[in-house]
Image (cartoon, grey):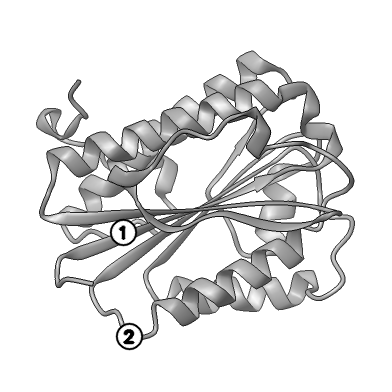
Amino acid sequence: MNNKRKIFNLILLDESGSMHSIKQATIEGFNETAQTIKAIQQQHPEEDHYITLVTFNGMGIKTLLSNQPVMELAEIEAKHYSPNANTPLYDAMGVTFQRLRYQLDLIKNYRVLVSIFTDGVENASKEFTGEAIKRLVEELKSEQWTFTYIGANHDVQKFASQISIHNTITFKSNAESVQHSLLQERNARMRYYQNVRENKQVGENYFTVTPPHKDSQPKD
């Protein structure tokens, strides 16, 4: 990879059975997020953006995209996302975080933005515990990783804080609420990128950081 600053956008997407009712809104939300990142990449060629998309349920953890350069990204479709089974959230986090951490071992100038989207609490992990995930998250925060958690049907702030994630949004399991929450996330994402360019720390203020300058908004 070249010497430009690299931003790794890691998205963990719940694919458990309860997500079926909001399947289409979730797919559309991911594709809109990808378009937002593409627009930022086009506007700021001095940085490189990559996307990793991982879905998870009791049938397995699937990596649909692995450090894909955003400009090469095609939209996902219904055939790529089939909600089923239960929610092994800790395993999905642990496996994915460890793999990306290993992949970044020799890279210096980078940031990682982790976005977790789920409509239910952990209920099926076998390899990782909540305490293990909390320790891993705290370690990665010191390595320029920022974590966000968007959830429904549970106490989102309480659960996320137990694994040391404090950037949260709560949504309801309907299409309108999904769309609204993902719009909030995309707006915060643009602010995050601007703060990275200005070498500001975001940390636990992802959804409340300083608004971007007008010229930082994506253009058509």
Residue 95, compared with residue 34, is above or below; it is: below
Describe residue 63's horizontal placement relative to residue 204 as left or right.
Answer: right
Circle 1 sits on which residue?
7
Q: Amino acid at mark 2?
A: Leu
Residue extending furthest toward the top: 176
Circle 2 sits on which residue?
106
Identify the residue at image location x=66%, y=64%: 93
Where residue 183 appears, as percent x and y from the top left, is 46, 25
Residue extending furthest toward the front: 79
Question: Between marks 1 and 2, how big is the CA–CA gap?
Answer: 15 Å
| Viewer-nearest residue: 75 or 46 | 75
| Viewer-nearest residue: 24 or 210 | 24
Residue 82, compared with residue 72, is above or below; it is: above
Check disc 1 and report its element: helix, strand or loop.
strand
Identify the residue at image location x=40%, y=33%: 186
| Viewer-nearest residue: 190 or 32 | 32
Where residue 137 appears, as percent x and y from the top left, is 57, 71
Where residue 44 appears, as percent x and y from the top left, is 13, 45
Describe residue 177's horizontal placement relative to residue 11 as left or right.
Answer: right
Where residue 46 appears, as percent x and y from the top left, is 10, 55
